[in-house]
Image (cartoon, rainbow, N blue to C red):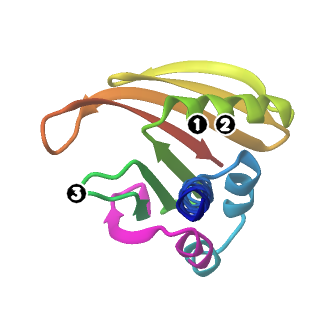
Amino acid sequence: MKNIFCSVLILLFIVASANAQTFTISELLKLQKYNYEQFETYVSAKGYKYIEIANSHLFTSYHFAVDMSQNKASRHIAYNINNQDGTIVIEYQTSFLSEYNKLKIAAKSAGFIYSEIDHYEQGVFLTYKKNNREVSFYSSRGENSYGELLTFYEISVK
């Protein structure tokens, strides 16, 4: 009986930890309004680790990841600062289709309305708008650093 109780507690802990590392549409919209220090504190509290900063002529991006194993990660989140106008874009990437679909349903439930479709490289962007906010959903197939073909799902909030 004691072993069953311990097993149930461990299972509940694992489920709670996995859910703590996901994001809701409400959280992503809130994170887009944060400054970098607030963003870093929030995602770190969820177990995300800083992995890199990437600079391009368009954006300065701060990348975090969780569930890392052998240089693979199942979830990424990035705080992107537009170098032209200072606009903040939050990008959340998951390898779980069910999570991606839940976020898309939640965006529609929150009043975001489908506005356009766009094709980019190996994927498709679906854009939803509400007032001056925009949420884009992107799915793409590509190789990871081990040459494995995977599908990635990305949600961008601006």
Please tell me whether residue 48 belongs to the stretch shown in magenta: yes
The residue that appears at 56% across and 58% down in the rendered structure is 21
Quadrant of residue 33 in the image? bottom right
Of helix, strand and loop, which one carries label 2? helix
* Labels 1 and 2 touching (C-beta < 8 A): yes
Task: Give above or below for 6 relative to 8.
Answer: below
Q: Position of residue 76 (x, y in %)?
A: 44, 54
Q: Amino acid at mark 2?
A: Leu
Quadrant of residue 55 in the image? bottom left
Of helix, strand and loop, which one carries label 1? helix
Alpha carbons under labels 1 and 3: distance apart: 22 Å
Alpha carbons under labels 3 and 2: distance apart: 26 Å
The answer to which of 19 and 55 lies nearer the viewer is 19
Residue 87 in sight from this viewpoint: no
Residue at mark 3: 71
Between label 1 and label 2, give the one nearer the viewer.
1
Q: Earlier in the sequence, mark 1 or mark 3?
A: 3
Of helix, strand and loop, which one carries label 3? loop
Category of crowding for the residue at label 2, using alpha-carbon neighbours closer than 10 angstroms: few (below 14), some (14–19), many (at least 20): some
Please tell me whether residue 54 belongs to the stretch shown in magenta: yes
Q: Is residue 43 left or right of residue 68?
A: right
* Labels 1 and 3 touching (C-beta < 8 A): no
Q: Any mark on residue 103, and which?
A: 2
> Which residues make up the magenta segment?
41-61
The residue that appears at 52% across and 20% down in the rendered structure is 118
Quadrant of residue 113 in the image? top right
Quadrant where the N terminus is found in the figure:
bottom right
Q: Any mark on residue 99, and which?
A: 1
Alpha carbons under labels 1 and 2: distance apart: 6 Å
Q: Position of residue 137 (x, y in %)?
A: 57, 32
Q: Is residue 77 left or right of residue 87?
A: left
